[in-house]
Image: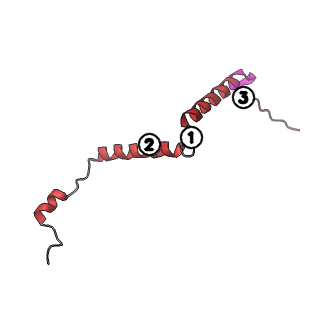
Amino acid sequence: MGQCLPCLGDAAKDAVETPDPEIKRRQLAEAAEKRQMEASSRGIKNAYSVEQKKKKQEEIEKRMAASRPGGEGGLRWQVG
């Protein structure tokens, strides 16, 4: 009996120190970024090609916006 509690002298060695708040913030930010990257690539076999297609589409949209006369997107309101 009495063997279930560790000696108080050894308890100080086993105690876990909390990290500095700045280190903790950095670790949380890294973990959040990792989760975001995993979530964005979930269900996609080749994330690199998807990213390239997205960039190509944005480039095409920029060119089309620049080539439109008036620069207002080509939409006109008609009152009638």
Query: What range is drawn magenta here?
Result: 64-80
* Residue at x-position 14% and y-position 78%: 1
User: Mark 3 or 2, which is nearer the eye?
Assistant: 2
**Is 48 placed above or below 4 here?**
above
- Marks 3 and 2 sit apart, C-alpha to C-alpha, by 36 Å
Element under label 2?
Answer: helix
* Residue at x-position 49% and y-position 44%: 38
Name the amino acid, label 2: Glu
Q: Which residue is mark 2?
A: 33
Where in the figure is residue 15, as x and y percent of width and height? 20, 58
Indicate which disc, 3 or 2, sits on the residue closer to the N terminus: 2
Sort mark 3 into few (<14), some (14-19) or many (20+) by Cα contacts within 10 Å.
Answer: few
**Is 4 placed above or below 61 here?**
below
Please state, as top left, top right, bottom left or bottom right, where the C terminus lies in the image: top right
Indicate which disc, 1 or 3, sits on the residue closer to the N terminus: 1
* Residue at x-position 48% and y-position 42%: 37
- Residue most toward the right? 80
Q: Using the image, tell me which numbered label, if any, was put on residue 56.
A: none
Name the amino acid, label 3: Glu
Picture quarter containing residue 22? top left
Element under label 1?
Answer: loop
Q: Which residue is mark 1?
A: 45
* Residue at x-position 69% and y-position 26%: 65
- Marks 1 and 2 sit apart, C-alpha to C-alpha, by 20 Å
Where in the figure is residue 39, as x and y percent of width and height? 51, 46
Q: Which residue is mark 3?
A: 72
- Residue most toward the bottom? 1
